[in-house]
């Protein structure tokens, strides 16, 4: 039973001037269709598997994003709406414990039913009701509704990226190493010239970070606030595989002096010897991509490294990772463009050969920062169960910035804060170096 | 790579006069078709799930039984046979470690590929090659081939029962409690009169047990040998749910004095309060069947109990479980008939109302004995990797006898020895009491 | 609070003609003093450690055997007896769950209090009260009391052996490899001539096993009953280290075909490469003894092997382990003499150079049999909480026979049944081969 | 074998003007004697126990602090020094993995040897050599030596606090609830008047934090640097038990909305229902102290709460925890005085009845801040193995400030940064509230 607080208005701070109904309807259709497109290459069997507890079966993602609209839009705003199935609220609630006890996450892969077809039926029913509601909702409730709907669409975009990272894990786990899609020529990257590692310099002082513009943002990007930043420099591109191989060749995974204590424990206990998805075959390093196995290309950004590996690499190289403030201040000066999900390569691409300004800030790979994920001064989460969206995770995780090759282009901003545990590796996460000046 | 010892002849002791080619071909087709029939009600998704490490995904069973024919028949006997897929030998070897390192059992449910369709293609290819080989094999090798083929068919019948027990676990685990098939009227059992608990008495002395007749048997049923048995009595039917409820009402699951020490630890650690698949809803006991949830029927045999529960029930009732010798000596006097898989109910049925001779010895539910699974005096396993079939499990398990409602009728014999760990509950396992005289 | 059933008379079947008070008092004093003697070499710190959950801190043993007398003798038979400490009944109950919930076994090493001195004070108080009670108990209750007291003394002798095996584990775990006592010349065994491996042959038929004589026995040795035994042969001595090294050199720990399935899992998961306490230093095998580290002597019986290792060795050698009936029938023909705790060497000694009759049946090392530990036909445990002494462990363990170099000489009988899990290695357990004839 | 880098000079940044030899010798003697004083109430058995892996046996602490002087002072600076025992470097290295592989931490409680007496002999030998070296070291090396020695003394003071927290855990774990010392009258606190919860207000802006004065500090307190702080307020005293009971009575441990996600998981998995060491007896809350069990006193500061509990309490109360900068800026304005180890109460005491300025900033209980433990901008760890002292732990832990009733008074500073994982509760850790202004 959805708790009553799902109908509370989202706090004013989070609301923007409401979008037009037809615009929002078009956007709803576009985002929903995008999710379905991503699943086209999947076999029914691929939808059901959970290869580790961080991964969810693709079927679960499909159902969960529909559950979000059903729970936070249809039920509170459509008085005569009848839930599609009485148990789906239990099965497809992810973590909103104030809403109800969710089905245990590590067991999502133990459910053969509902079938994939039934989950798509659920999706269709939710879509039908949503389209009707968008068209018919009385004006006085529109602003609240539109704010929530916008949140729901960004939520679904987050799950689009998770779908891709989880599918990659599912396919890579399989000894048959099946492909999700075919190689694209531009994803080969074999003949690219190495881009030199230039540095951009920034003057410190009291600066402002946090969401500033008029558009949507998550609550964790607010409030905009002042920070004191020292002079610093940022590398103009991501660390690439060739550079990372030097670290490996220098004994990076065998020498504890480069590692945080918890990181060194991970190296030993999980026997890390290379980034996730790397495999040594006949003396050469290969890696698994969504287009199957292929040799490691030296110019491509290193990807699927944990914070611990990013931090150890930085320490070995005599540099450090940027703080999230340093990153955001630099990114605000650049256009939001890069190798996103929309390009279709679904793999990080080599940096352009020469550059003085920082490149690859957006897309390619999420960039680990040295900033623990914490609330901004004066932060207030959303009201009701949606307040669990971000705030309750502000402990023991690290901030990543900039999006990846699996992030929808329209989903990212300079102020966007992603967060994962320091040992997580299955996201498209890479390394940008920073330094003091 | 299959090891060479797969081509060794099976020891003479195990071979019988060879069956006719056409008979064996017909039997091959019948058994293979039976497996496919059992899977007809499954959704593709049901094939992929492993709800605990004892359970295998149905897809895995389908592939594994084909792998058995490929590995132990096609490759050794058909010189130009080319395996269907180079990695299937790794994926679908169950436990023949002298043959090669198998894929880890607890991770069978983490493989979305090969798909169900591909596994059926594998099956078709193996069938085609097998039919050709049965028809064409040169006479001098026929006897060995026929002995192995017969073993392979009994092996597949074992997996037919495992398919049903694993499907039951998969469906029962799901909060939606989906059905495998529809209720059959004869499975309702609501209006049956309670059968009185009569006892059959047997005179002790030196007796012979073990396989005696001309037909097939597994190596663990041999050699036939003498044992000394004391006078004893056997209950004429299985313990039923009503009787088991009395044990529960008497605090059976709360009073340690009825339990073996390891059993009591299981009760506490796993919080056992009733047989597996029982659930208390609104104050009444229900149980999950392959036809869905329904109220516990008192006249039906209690089923899905562990050895620990069977033993505790027997101690509470002032009786004991039979030894396997006692059971076999009694069963040899009865016709092999009962409620088997072939009846289609797939659920234990109440005993006939009155009986002096023991009933339900065959079918309904496997009967836990008090006998640890151990080699008979002079026991020798099969040669080569097939020697791993039974012998290496002769430790820490208990013998069950008589088959169940999920066992193919043609698969059981009085000398048949099934074996599971004393805490296992997902098989159709029940209780027959014995007593000293 | 001790439950009332501790006062129930032990069943008649277990009682013998009662011993004389002064004899029993002398025996009480002797056994109690023996336990204290064994602890003389210990530092206070050695008393407190639990290096694995099978091991108990020596301090716990000292307290537990006193608790046994307090709980089963003083409280039921001495009306005005006041327990030494109200919480000791909780702390020092081992496994009598019908008596009360014991303190968790794996956490016995987490208790610094009571101190060793307090535990010895407890011991002294119990001894004082016991001596008084032995001298003063009214005649009508004497028989029951004497039967229980005799059980308590055998119980304490069992803990004498456990004290030694646990002390050995505690000292061997320590990287400093401290000694419990000094080497004794006769324990060196370096110059002994290898004894040939002769075989004694026995004719089969219906035989009787189980306790027969007038003296004390545990309930699990009864009732004496008939068994059918086939013709067999027993090796005339234990397998020695030199022979076991041949098995190791032949790849014993790398070749799954010699192992039971559960045994092979233990080899892999626990990385077994030699018996417990063996260590390779500079290319040579050494072993830890209660007299410290020393090179493996080839003529000494192999010791500290699990059932799995004993069984694998036997399979590799083309023989098998004896059944407990085979062992007992042979042992009944031999005098009860051997290298027991009383000799003080506390280490298995080489067999005498030549022998036709079986030697080493008693003492040196417990001999794993192929018999699962199960109740004899007609077995009934003692009444009350003491019924938990043996019966509830009759599952998943294997029988060992004959005692070891850590067993008090007066504690063993041909019918004595010891039992441990097939993977246990910290007892002084070795191998005697058997064969069919 | 100590690695050579132990002889590297500590970086200049960390060195102060060197103290006088006689002063340092006196300080060495005072600190070492203090450690021994703390152990006086211990029984030998108390020295050996490790009740969870965070806890070390007191014996280990005694040896480890001596190992620190031996490894980082005696061996590098005294050419003819011979280590006390060749294996102690392995046994008593805590976490300096660049120095050598330490003995596994969770198994420290499994070592009965060296005995307590041997560990004290080790201590005496190290002391003798240290005194000699302090008196005789050649002048050119004195500055480096003095800097390291000072570090060693602060290291030993840290272990003095850990000794007390570990002893408390060891004694509290024991069902007998033994006392470490007797109640002191001033520790009763029963008749104290409740202090009102006043607030001190602070104006924000660019401020400097980090170590500023001339004395010793750890590397993690440097460099002093600028931060931007918003206007804020600090509560004038710690949260007390009475206030925390209100949170508990309001369902604090049952309502997920107050908790971080990881915190709520801890509540559920570890069944938290009150602070560590609280116990409900006959309907009333008691708590374990180093002076034994006693009723919860409402005016005493709540203690032994995790960061998760502190954060949940703050959220429930509508406030928040302070950042470490906010805390330090306020603390710099107050004298370093409070209820430290030196007072002997070893328990937090109620705040003085009225106060406008913040009290209890020092002593009583460590105060959880909302700041993840991270490097200050420009932070550089010490050279060599001593660089592992602080830097490698800068991930996933939270900063605590101000010291506790178990901290030596001479050990604390306003810039002192302590750090523990957010779920840790066995330190004397409490709660001070902050708020925005």
Image: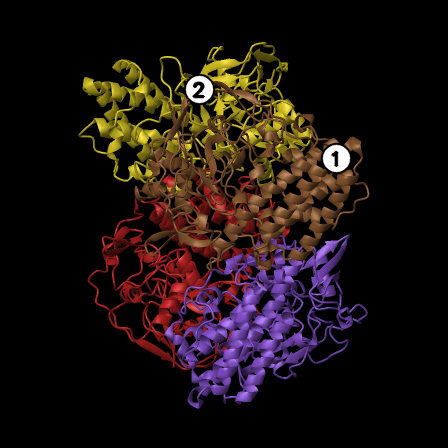
Chain colours: A red, B yellow, C brown, D purple
Image position, residue D300 (x, y; %): 73, 68
In this rendering, the answer to whether A152 lies above or below B351 is below
Q: Is residue B162 left or right of residue D249?
A: left
Task: Give percent across and percent down for residue A250.
Answer: 30, 67
Work out whether C187 lies above or below D208.
Answer: above
Q: Are marks 1 and 2 in contact (CB under 8 Å)?
A: no
For mark 2, give the secondary structure. Answer: loop
Quadrant containing the N terminus of chain D is bottom left
- The residue tagged 1 is C7
Q: Which mark is residue B35?
A: none
Front residue of C86 and C318:
C318
Spatial CA distance of label 1 from label 2 is: 44 Å
**Between B281 and C215, the one nearer to me in the picture:** C215
User: Could you tell me which secondary element the residue under label 1 belongs to?
Assistant: helix
Above or below, A92 relative to D278: above
Q: Earlier in the sequence, mark 1 or mark 2?
A: 1
Residue D256 lies, in percent from the top left, at 61, 55
Q: Chain letter of disc 1?
A: C
Depth order, front residue of B85/D164: D164
Q: Quadrant of the C terminus of chain D?
A: bottom right
Q: Quadrant of residue B212?
A: top left
Tell me, yes or no, if residue D223 can be seen here. no
Marks 1 and 2 share the same chain: yes
Q: What residue is disc 2 on?
A: C204
* Chain containing mark 2: C
Callout 1: 10 Å neighbours few (<14), some, many (20+)?
Answer: some
Residue at position x 59%, y 78% in the image: D31
Is C9 rendered above or below residue D257? Answer: above
């Amino acid at each position: 039973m959805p708790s009553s607080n799902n109908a509370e208005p989202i706090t004013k701070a989070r609301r923007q001037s409401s979008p037009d109904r037809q615009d929002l309807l078009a956007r709803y259709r576009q985002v929903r269709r995008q999710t379905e497109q991503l699943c086209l290459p999947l076999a029914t069997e691929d939808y059901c598997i959970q290869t580790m507890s961080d991964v969810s079966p693709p079927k679960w993602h499909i159902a969960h994003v529909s559950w979000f609209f059903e729970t936070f839009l249809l039920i509170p705003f459509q008085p005569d709406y009848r839930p599609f199935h009485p148990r789906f609220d239990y099965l497809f609630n992810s973590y909103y414990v104030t809403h109800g006890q969710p089905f245990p996450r590590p067991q999502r892969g133990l459910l053969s039913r509902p079938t994939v077809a039934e989950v798509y039926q659920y999706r269709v029913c939710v879509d039908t009701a949503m389209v009707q509601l968008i068209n018919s909702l009385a004006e006085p409730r529109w602003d609240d509704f539109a704010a929530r709907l916008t949140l729901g669409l960004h939520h679904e975009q987050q799950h689009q990226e998770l779908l891709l990272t989880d599918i990659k894990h599912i396919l890579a786990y399989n000894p048959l190493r099946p492909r999700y899609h075919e190689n694209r020529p531009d994803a080969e990257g074999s003949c690219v010239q190495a881009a030199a590692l230039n540095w951009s310099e920034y003057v410190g002082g009291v600066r402002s970070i946090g969401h500033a513009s008029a558009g949507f943002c998550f609550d964790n990007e607010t409030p905009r606030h002042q920070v004191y930043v020292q002079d610093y420099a940022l590398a103009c591109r991501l660390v690439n595989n060739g550079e990372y191989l030097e670290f490996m060749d220098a004994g990076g995974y065998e020498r504890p002096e480069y590692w945080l204590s918890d990181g060194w424990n991970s190296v030993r206990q999980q026997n890390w010897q290379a980034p996730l998805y790397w495999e040594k075959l006949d003396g050469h390093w290969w890696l698994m991509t969504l287009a199957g196995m292929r040799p490691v290309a030296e110019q491509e950004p290193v990807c699927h490294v944990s914070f611990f590996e990013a931090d150890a690499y930085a320490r070995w190289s005599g540099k450090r990772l940027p703080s999230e403030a340093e990153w955001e201040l630099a990114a605000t000066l650049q256009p939001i463009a890069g190798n996103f999900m929309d390009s279709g390569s679904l793999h990080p691409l080599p940096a352009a050969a020469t550059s003085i300004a920082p490149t690859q800030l957006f897309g390619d790979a999420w960039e680990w920062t040295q900033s623990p994920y914490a609330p901004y001064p004066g932060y207030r989460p959303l009201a009701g169960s949606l307040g669990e969206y971000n705030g309750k995770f502000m402990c023991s995780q690290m901030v990543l910035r900039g999006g990846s090759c699996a992030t929808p282009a329209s989903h990212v901003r300079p102020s966007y804060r992603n967060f994962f545990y320091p040992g997580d590796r299955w996201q498209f996460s890479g390394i940008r170096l920073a330094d003091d000046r």
